[in-house]
Amino acid sequence: MDTPKIEFEAVSKCFGEHQVLDRISFKVSPARVHALLGRNGAGKSTLLSILLGLLPADSGKVAIDGHPFSRVDLRNIGASINGPAFYGHLSARNNLLVHTKLLGLPATEADRTLAIVGLQDTGKKKAKSFSTGMKARLALAQAMLGNPQILVLDEPQNGLDPQGISDLRHLLRDWAARGATVLVSSHQLGEVMHLADDVTIISDSRVAYSGPLNELAPSGNLEEEFFRLTTGAQHA
């Protein structure tokens, strides 16, 4: 068994009296796509924010490559959570150039990632005028700058058309096939069946399942298993 790239160990988080995460523990392995699932408000984005050091956990810890997370680890992590974040008055390329300068990367890296996500021909068009799908592609391009070994993406399919979703699936599968680690939250259970190797389902603030997708839903009916674990009954 490969050493986990990411490990959550008994991570808990409350907002006031509301327990959002209760001793969440699971592992994310390299060279695999891992989907984080749960109903709205299950705590997925909160957990990803804790992973990236944006929120402190009340208790528990996150390990990267077997050591406690530190800000140095962010050099090897590409992320997009809580929706796209960019400068609306700048073009797609200039948005990425801001990040390449911060990361110490050459300008050609902006062009490379724009081509990967299909935004190479947007020219001087300002990002604020982009469609929802184009904004999602720009967020993905930002996350991919520098070929990070870990990709953390919060609902990356949002706003993409069917072709965009298919392109994203192949991109993330190829990314993992090269040995990288991909952690993706999603509500699109049908797409998760095509995308993920492993899944973790959070329900009632706790882990309801974490492991290989084909062991959870050997028949291919992830939706049935998801509702069984998150409601206690099959979905009608």
Image (tube, rainbow, N blue to C red):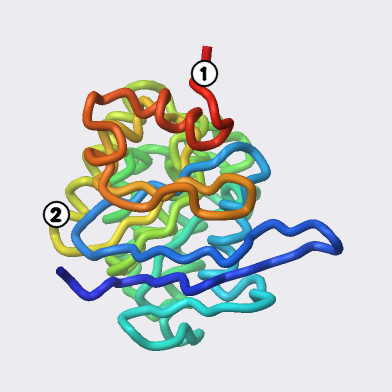
Residue 10 sits above or below residue 45 on the image: below
Q: Is residue 65 left or right of residue 178?
A: right
In the current view of this chain or complex, which residue is farthest to the top?
Answer: 236
In the current view of this chain or complex, which residue is farthest to the right?
Answer: 16
> What count of labels does the image hold?
2
| Image quadrant in which the N terminus is located | bottom left
Quadrant assignment, res 218: top left
Q: Position of residue 126 (x, y in %)?
A: 58, 43
Residue 231 sits above or below residue 176 on the image: above
Q: Which mark is residue 24?
A: none
Of residue 33 and residue 227, the one placed in the foreground of this image is 227
Q: Tell me which residue sits at (14%, 60%) in the image.
A: 178
Q: Which mark is residue 235?
A: 1
Quadrant assignment, res 213: top left
Q: Position of residue 130 (x, y in %)?
A: 55, 35
Q: Position of residue 59 (x, y in %)?
A: 63, 78
Element type where label 1 sits in the image = loop
Q: Is residue 28 left or right of residue 74?
A: left
Q: Position of residue 192 (x, y in %)?
A: 34, 35
Q: Identify the residue position indicated by label 2 in the image.
A: 177
Q: Is residue 14 left or right of residue 227?
A: right
Q: Residues within 10 Å of mark 1 (few under 14, many from 20)?
A: few
Measured in 3D between alpha carbons, the distance from the residue under mark 1 to the one under mark 2, in whole angstroms, is 34 Å
Q: Tell me which residue sits at (36%, 60%) in the image.
A: 151
Of residue 50 and residue 19, the one placed in the foreground of this image is 19
* Residue type, mark 1 in image: His
Q: Tell me which residue sits at (79%, 62%) in the image.
A: 15
Q: Given contact means CB atoms under 8 Å apart, are the residues at marks 1 and 2 in contact?
A: no
* Residue type, mark 2 in image: Ala
Q: Tell me which residue sits at (54%, 61%) in the image.
A: 48
Mark whose residue sits in front, 1 or 2: 1
Element type where label 2 sits in the image = helix
